Image (cartoon, rainbow, N blue to C red):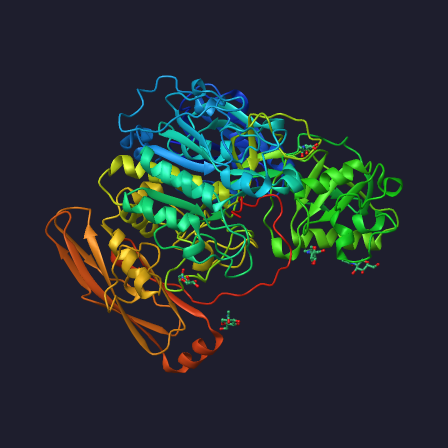
């Protein structure tokens, strides 16, 4: 949710004096400075440009001759011709921003409701300065309770309620040292998600330690926010044990939100295992919301990289995966043998610039800790203070939270901490506000460090302080933790729908929590960086609010369609979006239709619309009439594949199969669309008719898609149980991608970024 507002007007590369054969001085010229910007921000931005083409941060700093900061925006630096040409390529990434925000009046008068852990109303992200009166349609309330009165609501935070009858029936009365019996947030999660969706634009914000400094803004900064607190701490586990949200409490909240008049509902809540719709309170509540044209956006879950781990699989929900942004927090590590390893963190603590003894956690555990891989994971109480004192300790991810491992190293007197990814985490580096000097390294580097320790008599290391670096590449890539398809409840529906930023996201935080949520961490922050599909979901809720503002008459299906058909498939290197390794292309079971592009979604040309009745018919043919007993299923309902969804998934394709779709013209009155197909290998696809003519806005046209597996692949597909899928893209460009997915076995539990799971 960070807004980065360096918009170069033009980028000229003027080679000046030749220093040596390959390195010359170039002036990189952006024109004038736009907006007010602090001197250090300008310098940091210039430095970031350089760092994006140089190997190391030191090299980038050393190459900078001048940073022009007053009237001229630009810098002079020594570059190779290759680096210079890479820099000029950066210009293309700076698309014109702000059109949708302006057209949508920043989401003014759209109401976003969130089901979460509550809200910190004093956050600057919820100030209502200059905002108009609360929309007349609003019927919600501001419920008082512990440390919360009706005066905590304002023209920004227009509603706040809490629901805990289900929770208290199960756990007994809420322990008020663990949470407020009111809409006030003692966790941080709800404050983070609600400010991401609809927080105000707040200048001069940063995370603890000055990271990610700049202007913070929600997706729809003038939208109204209503908090429905439904998630509470699990008492037996304490605050670190996470939160739980009971189905009956969530259903009550959704029922109220529908009655109150929200336009968009954002639920960063998932299940630990796939749940049939009849037992899924979110799916049932969402169906009722969609009947009233409320857009419902939900997290895909954090149970990746294993296949078939999705939450929120219903077709009437917009389901969001998580991917990275082009901002990193580099904290390199140097080993005693001179090797430098890239790492990331947002810990505010720094080591002295000298070498310290380095150990692998398994070498410094108490004698009663079993000698298995668990020994290297720094679980609470595992480390021996005699052995760990004064050392930098390498711990692996797996069981336990990432920040909890740092706390264990600190408890045992360790001086620094290296968090190593397990193979399942790949190259995804979650930047955490650890309680001691630290850095996080990818799986490959973690193994290199273990190897160095194994082979060295007195292994040593030093961790450099972290720096915020912009324009990193590749971005976006998929987070390893993002839950994957195929859809286990409705295999004919491709899920997730799209992906959005969910790795290392800065947003507002509860001042009654700490950045790590650890017992014993007494730090108080106003903004915090965390990761999860909980963070990506409200990005899309904010975008949906903007689309609602621009197209108030669109159904929730039309808004989903616009987001899906306009999604992007390439990263900032012009290559296919990859998985967390940064190398292997990701697939639609990870990102659905791709990365959301709200600007493009505002003008999708055609939309695939669907009504409440269509969803009921879909349930009839997939065997469940129970979600709406008043709906009479016809004897022969259309097959589930014919739900007018903007994507298409075909489980176990054998032979040929034909499905029907209907598009509605929301673009120019007179327009022509041609079908264009890129079928997956071994599959042929025919669209009929191949051309659609429209004479007016709102006109509907239907077409069929016939998908056929080549004979030699039929058996293979069938046997392996692989899904084939096709995906319809904007302007009836029927695209598609390879259908393979690789099932990765991983037994480890997700660490601290679980979306609050419903009981
Ligand atoms: C409430 O939680 C606190 C903190 O975990 C604990 O010390 C206290 O014993 C709990 N109270 C009850 C009544 O369970
Ligand atoms: C390090 O040494 C241990 C035993 O001494 C061995 O089990 C492990 O595989 C080694 N690791 C690496 C990466 O060399
Ligand atoms: C999908 O097919 C590939 C080979 O084409 C195979 O390796 C993989 O195991 C299959 N996936 C499943 C879930 O069967
Ligand atoms: C986590 O702990 C459980 C129970 O001790 C164990 O079965 C599992 O293998 C562990 N997972 C990892 C990744 O260490
Ligand atoms: C798709 C779906 O939710 N199917 C469910 C229909 O209802 C039966 C029994 O109530 C469940 O077992 C299915 O999972």
At which x and y percent is residue 286? 36, 47
Is residue 586 shown above or below 599?
below
Percent x, y of residue 259:
32, 36
Q: Quadrant of ligand 1?
A: top right
Q: Position of residue 267 (x, y in %)?
A: 44, 42
Give the residue displayed 18% in from the left and 66% down from the top.
689
Front residue (pair 227, 170): 170
Q: Nearer the viewer, residue 336 or 649?
A: 649
Residue 699 picture location, percent across and down: 14, 52
Q: Which corner quadrant of the image does residue 728 belong to?
A: bottom left
**In the picture shown, does residue 714 fall above or below 77?**
below
- Say which residue appears at 49% left-offset and 65% top-offset: 741
Q: Is residue 412 visible?
A: yes
Left or right: 173 as drawn, with respect to 416 = left
Instruction: Please identify the residue farthest to the left as the structure is shown.
Output: 695
Q: Nearer the viewer, residue 270 or 493?
A: 270
Relative to 328, residue 664 above or below: below
Residue 52: tell me if it is visible.
Answer: no
Residue at x 46% of width, y 60% of height: 485
């Amino acid at each position: 949710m960070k807004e980065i507002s360096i918009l170069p007007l033009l980028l000229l590369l003027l080679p000046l004096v030749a220093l040596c054969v390959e390195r010359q001085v170039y002036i990189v010229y952006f024109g004038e400075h736009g907006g007010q910007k602090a001197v250090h921000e300008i310098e940091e931005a210039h430095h970031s440009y350089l760092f994006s083409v140089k190997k190391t941060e030191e090299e980038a700093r050393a190459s900078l001759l001048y940073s022009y900061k007053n009237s001229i925006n630009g810098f002079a630096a020594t570059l190779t011709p290759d680096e210079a040409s890479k820099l000029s390529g950066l210009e293309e990434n700076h698309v014109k921003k702000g059109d949708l925000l302006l057209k949508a009046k920043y989401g003014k008068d759209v109401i976003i409701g969130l089901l979460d852990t509550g809200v910190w109303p004093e956050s600057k992200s919820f100030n209502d300065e200059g905002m108009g009166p609360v929309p007349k349609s609003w019927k919600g309330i501001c419920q008082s309770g512990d440390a919360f009165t009706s005066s905590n609501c304002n023209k920004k935070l227009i509603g706040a309620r809490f629901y805990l009858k289900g929770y208290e029936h199960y756990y007994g009365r809420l322990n008020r040292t663990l949470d407020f019996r009111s809409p006030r947030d003692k966790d941080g999660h709800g404050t983070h998600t609600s400010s991401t969706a609809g927080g105000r634009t707040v200048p001069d914000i940063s995370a603890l330690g000055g990271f990610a400094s700049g202007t913070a803004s929600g997706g729809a900064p003038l939208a109204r926010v209503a908090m429905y607190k439904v998630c509470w701490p699990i008492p037996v586990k304490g605050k670190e044990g996470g939160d739980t949200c009971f189905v009956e409490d969530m259903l009550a909240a959704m029922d109220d939100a529908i009655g109150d008049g929200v336009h968009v509902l954002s639920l960063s809540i998932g299940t630990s295992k796939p749940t049939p719709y009849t037992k899924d309170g979110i799916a049932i509540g969402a169906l009722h919301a969609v009947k009233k044209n409320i857009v419902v956006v939900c997290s895909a879950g954090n149970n990746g990289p294993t296949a078939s781990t999705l939450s929120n699989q219903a077709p009437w929900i917009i389901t969001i995966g998580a991917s990275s942004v082009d901002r990193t927090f580099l904290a390199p590590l140097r080993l005693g043998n001179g090797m430098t390893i890239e790492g990331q963190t947002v810990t505010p603590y720094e080591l002295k610039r000298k070498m310290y003894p380095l150990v692998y956690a398994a070498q410094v555990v108490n004698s009663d800790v079993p000698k298995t891989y668990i020994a290297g994971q720094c679980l609470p109480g595992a480390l021996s203070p005699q052995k760990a004192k004064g050392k930098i300790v390498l711990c692996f991810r797996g069981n336990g939270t990432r920040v909890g491992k740092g706390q264990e190293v600190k408890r045992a007197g360790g001086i620094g901490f290296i968090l190593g990814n397990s193979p399942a985490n790949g190259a995804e580096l979650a930047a955490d506000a650890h309680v001691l000097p630290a850095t996080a390294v990818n799986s490959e580097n973690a193994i290199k460090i273990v190897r160095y320790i194994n082979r060295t008599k007195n292994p040593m290391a030093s961790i450099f302080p972290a720096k915020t670096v912009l324009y990193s590449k590749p971005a976006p890539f998929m987070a390893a933790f993002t839950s994957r398809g195929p859809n286990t409840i409705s295999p004919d529906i491709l899920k997730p729908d799209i992906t959005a930023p969910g790795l290392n996201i800065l947003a507002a935080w509860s001042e009654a929590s700490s950045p790590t949520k650890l017992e014993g961490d007494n730090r108080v922050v106003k903004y915090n960086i965390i990761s999860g599909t909980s963070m990506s979901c409200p990005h899309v809720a904010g975008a949906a609010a903007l689309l609602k503002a621009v197209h108030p008459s669109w159904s929730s299906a039309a808004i989903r369609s616009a987001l899906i058909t306009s999604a992007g498939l390439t990263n900032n290197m012009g290559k296919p979006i990859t998985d967390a390794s940064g190398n292997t292309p990701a697939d639609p079971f990870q990102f659905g239709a791709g990365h959301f592009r709200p600007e493009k979604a505002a003008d999708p040309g055609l939309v695939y619309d669907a009504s409440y009745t269509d969803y009921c018919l879909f349930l009839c043919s997939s065997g469940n009439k129970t979600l709406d007993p008043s709906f009479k299923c016809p004897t022969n309902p259309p097959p589930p594949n014919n739900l007018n969804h903007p994507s298409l998934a075909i489980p176990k394709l054998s032979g040929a199969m034909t499905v029907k779709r209907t598009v509605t013209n929301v673009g120019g009155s007179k327009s022509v669309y041609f079908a264009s197909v890129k079928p997956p290998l071994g599959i042929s696809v025919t669209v009929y008719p191949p051309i659609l003519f429209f004479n007016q806005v709102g006109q509907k046209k239907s077409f069929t898609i016939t998908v056929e597996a080549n004979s030699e692949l039929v058996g293979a597909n069938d046997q392996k149980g692989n899904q084939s899928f096709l995906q319809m893209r904007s302007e009836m460009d029927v695209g598609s991608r390879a259908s393979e997915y690789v099932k990765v076995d991983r037994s480890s539990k997700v660490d601290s970024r679980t979306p609050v799971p419903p009981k």
